[in-house]
Each structure stands twice: as C-alpha cells, then as structure tokens.
C-alpha cells in the first residue's frame, strides 16, 4: 500500500486510504504523543478535515509505503519520521475502538485480522443469576 500525500491532503484522506486496506483498524493523528490512560487524548487529536500543509513542514509530495508485515510500532515511528506527526493505531472490537499499545509488535495484518474476529463475534447472552443459589 502506498499513501500519496500532497499539501492539499487532509487527515481524513489518509484515514480513508488506510481504512480501505485495513477496515478493522483506524489511524488517529495528534500533535503530541498519545499516552495510554491519558485524559487529554480526545483534546489532542487533530480534526480529520485538517490540511496537512497547515500542521507539518514536511516536503510535498510525500509517499508513505506500508506493507502487511509492518508492525504497528514501526508504522507509528515511520509516520513520525516522514511527516512529523504522531499517529496511533486503534483496532475495532465490536462497537469500540481499542488503542493497540499493548500489541504494537503485532503486524498490521494480524491487528486487522484480530479486529475482524472481535467485530464479528455475536454478543453473548449473559445468564441471569439464580437468586436461590446465593447465600
């Protein structure tokens, strides 16, 4: 996969291109590193309609080369090196998006496959407690 970035590219353009190849993963961009458990995560995210030329001094055009065997950690580092932007990968888990920090050494392919599996599992019914068995 090759992402071709121009000065008129928006964050949403990158996200959409990435999502075509990895439908169970999502990229979020930030002006600073995203820390797990941080309460400021949503406030530090760059809005998806933002033009790249307004947030980075990288040279345009730029091409980001991504392959299925690339780890999440490598992708995040690569984006920072090429664009100066911090990116965080999130994986789908049903109706939730989970930050992948604990599994950053997994390949993009493995992350996407895991997201697909988690998103396709039916909601398990919870058995009600039998109040007669409780003391």
Image (cartoon, helix red, strand yellow):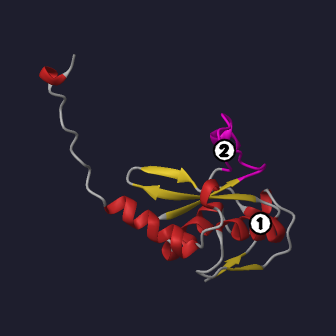
Residue 52, image x, y percentages: 74, 63
How many neighbours does mark 1 have within 10 angstroms: few (below 14), some (14-19), or many (20 or more)? some
> What secondary structure is found at the residue carrying circle 2?
loop
Choose the circle earlier in sequence order: 2 or 1. 2
Quadrant (top left, top right, bottom left, bottom right) of the N terminus: bottom right
Residue for point 52% across, 51% down: 98
Q: Residue 91 magenta-drawn?
A: no
What secondary structure predominates along the stretch shown in magenta? loop
Looking at the rendering, the stretch of residues picked out in magenta corresponds to 30-46
Of 129 and 121, which appears nearest the observer?
129
Q: Mark 2 and 1 residues: CB-CB less than 8 Å, in contact?
A: no
Residue 117 position by quadrant: bottom left
Return the mark for residue 132: none
Residue 36 position by quadrant: top right
Please determine whether, in this image, residue 59 is positioned above or below residue 124: below
Using the rendered image of the protein, determine whether residue 24 is visible from the camera's viewpoint.
yes
Residue for point 19% across, 29% down: 129
Residue occupied by mark 2:
36
Residue occupied by mark 1:
77
Using the rendered image of the protein, determine whether residue 48 is visible from the camera's viewpoint.
no
Q: Residue 34 magenta-drawn?
A: yes
Distance CA(mark 2)–CA(mark 1): 17 Å
Residue for point 40% across, 66% down: 116
> What secondary structure is found at the residue carrying circle 1?
helix
Residue 38, image x, y percentages: 68, 37
How many neighbours does mark 2 have within 10 angstroms: few (below 14), some (14-19), or many (20 or more)? few
Residue for point 46% across, 58% down: 92
Please determine whether, in this image, residue 29 is positioned above or below residue 25: above
Q: Residue furthest top?
A: 135
Residue 72 position by quadrant: bottom right
Residue 28, image x, y percentages: 63, 56
Of 130 and 7, which appears nearest the observer?
130
């Amino acid at each position: 996969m090759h992402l071709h970035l121009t000065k008129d590219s928006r964050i949403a353009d990158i996200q959409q291109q990435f999502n075509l190849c990895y439908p169970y993963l999502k990229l979020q961009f930030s002006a600073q590193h995203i820390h797990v458990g941080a309460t400021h995560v949503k406030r530090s995210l760059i809005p998806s309609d933002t033009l790249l030329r307004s947030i980075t001094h990288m040279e345009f055009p730029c091409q980001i080369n991504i392959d299925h065997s690339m780890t999440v950690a490598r992708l995040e580092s690569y984006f920072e090196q090429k664009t100066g932007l911090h990116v965080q990968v999130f994986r789908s888990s049903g109706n939730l998006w989970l930050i992948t920090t604990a599994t950053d050494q997994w390949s993009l392919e493995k992350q996407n496959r895991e997201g697909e599996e988690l998103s396709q599992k039916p909601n398990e019914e919870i058995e009600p407690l039998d109040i007669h068995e409780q003391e």
